[in-house]
Image (cartoon, rainbow, N blue to C red):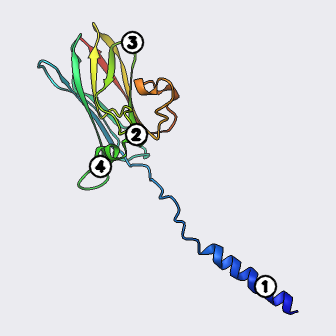
Amino acid sequence: MKTIKLLSILFIASILFTSCDNDDPEPVNEEEVITTMTATLTPLGGGGTIILKTQDLDGDGPDAPVVTVSGSLAANTVYNGVMEVLNETESPAEDITEEVLEEALEHQFFFTPTNSIATFAYSDADSDGNPLGIQFTLTTTDGGAGNITITLIHEPEKTEPGVSSGDITNAGGEADIEATFSVTVL
């Protein structure tokens, strides 16, 4: 009987000992709430700035996002681009761009044009030298109409083939926001 009591005490003590482990769990990095994404395109050498914007103030609600393009892109022109992402469910709006910049290793913008209307190049990088895409250049071709899809990926596989040059095919991760803009190059 004493042996059973002694074993019971040892068993309970071992449970208490292992449950008091001081290893804190990894903090969960919650996904950002993004209601608005804006690409501001400023042509080198002058000309009108073009704004590509998507805004979805009800998130997953019944209303579709409002997607706008402020004008046509000029043919054979280089544009400096800057991305901005906001959470406008808060007042004042939270600038998620700052968080993307702080967590640059875990984010990357991808720019996917159709109909060979433009090419993109990254102008910024994370601390490992991999592209981020908050700043970029867009170079238009001779002209035409097509789409530009902009996607912000959370936790992309930046070392996979093609990802560092902007190919979203092997990026993995999860889309924080994605929008397709119908554009014309004149």
**CA–CA distance between discs 2 and 4?**
20 Å
Q: Secondary structure at mark 2?
A: strand
Q: CA distance from mark 3 to mark 2?
A: 27 Å
What residue sits 45% from the left and 27% below the top? 163
Identify the residue position indicated by label 1 in the image: 8
Which quadrant would residue 119 be assigned to in this image?
Answer: top left
Residue 130 x/y as whole percent: 39, 32
First in sequence, mark 2 or 1: give its number.
Answer: 1
Look at the numbered disc 3 and give the secondary structure of its residue. loop
Q: Residue at x 79, y 88 (%)?
A: 6
CA distance for labels 2 and 1: 52 Å
Q: Is residue 63 above or below residue 91?
A: above
Residue 156 appears left or right of 11: left
Name the residue that disc number 4 marks: 88
| Type of amino acid under label 3 | Asn
Which image quadrant: the C terminus? Answer: top left
Q: Mark 3 Cα within 10 Å, few/some/many (few <14, many 20+)?
A: few
Of labels 3 and 2, earlier in sequence is 2
At x 25%, y 56%, the residue is: 91
**In the image, which disc is placed on residue 115?**
3
Asked whether 159 or 107 is in front, the reply is 159
Residue underneath mark 2 = 107
Q: Label 1 amino acid?
A: Ser
**Mark toward the viewer: 3 or 2:** 2
Relative to 65, 71 lies left or right? left
Residue 143 versus residue 97 in the image, above or below = above
